[in-house]
Image (cartoon, coloured by chain):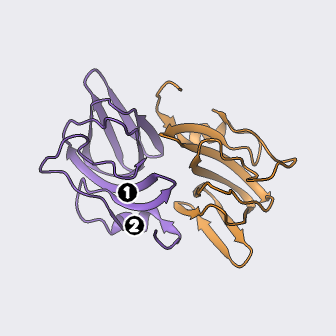
Chain colours: A orange, B purple
Amino acid sequence: MRERAVVDLAEKLSQIDEHWSPKIVAQVGDVQVKLARIQGTFDWHSHATEDELFMVVEGRMKLEFRDREVWLEQGQLYVVPSGVEHRPVAADEAQIMLIEPAGTRNTGDRVTGRTVEAEWL
Amino acid sequence: MRERAVVDLAEKLSQIDEHWSPKIVAQVGDVQVKLARIQGTFDWHSHATEDELFMVVEGRMKLEFRDREVWLEQGQLYVVPSGVEHRPVAADEAQIMLIEPAGTRNTGDRVTGRTVEAEWL
């Protein structure tokens, strides 16, 4: 368990120096809050059992689904239900918050070259 | 289960017309995201089994503990561990996000005149 400290989103995000590599900044029960910087188009994936909440802290992003897309602007959030295939896209860099069960893999049920194990920041 | 829709934090917060009455806007597994407007000093309480994350969306707030206090500015978050007595304070109105297990009572393990059951917004 981490020492409890105030987490400043902008300050934490400024410490992240790679895209698509979420860092854990808080935990509530079994759910973790992660921060990430993203740019470009991620891989299609789904999470068999985990819901995944995306919130835009800075910039904008798009969540692509097989049959539609959802745009998220700063200060907006969306929950991708478990089992639903999706891929995040950001033409320009976006800074985002994720809320998802601890152990949720960034590439979902597949292990790819972009799979990373989230670490605490 | 609610229909999945984009949640705009500012727009949702503008629909809340009373203080200290958190509204649910999203759920991830067993954890809910709530929004609240707060002003003044709330009651001392603790939650036996639930961690509670406070994040300031607009304004600033203070979390008082029996032995210390924690200030939170806009864009900052803090997790109050289960079992720790606390009370939120906001001299001027603040708009906040809470992340906590579904069913977490705003007044913790006590029922008081300020107890409200959170509803979806």
Circle 2 SS class: helix
Identity of the residue furthest to the right in this view: A113
Give the chain letter at badge 2: B
At 67% from the left and 66% from the top, the residue drawn is A84
At 81% from the left and 59% from the top, the residue drawn is A43
Relative image position of residue A62 (x, y in whole percent): 68, 67
Give the chain letter at badge 1: B
- Mark 1 and mark 2 in contact? Answer it, CB < 8 Å: yes
Identity of the residue furthest to the left in this view: B113
Q: Vertically, is A86 above or below B89?
A: below
Q: How many marks?
A: 2
Amino acid type, mark 2? Lys
Q: Vertically, is B71 above or below A99?
A: above
Relative image position of residue B77 (x, y in whole percent): 45, 40
Q: Which residue is mark 1?
A: B35
Identity of the residue furthest to the bottom in this view: A67
Crowding at dot 1, Cα within 10 Å, few <14 / some 14-19 / many 20+, comes out as: many
Amino acid type, mark 1? Leu
Splitting the image into 4 quarters, where does residue B71 fall? top left
Q: Which residue is mark 2?
A: B12
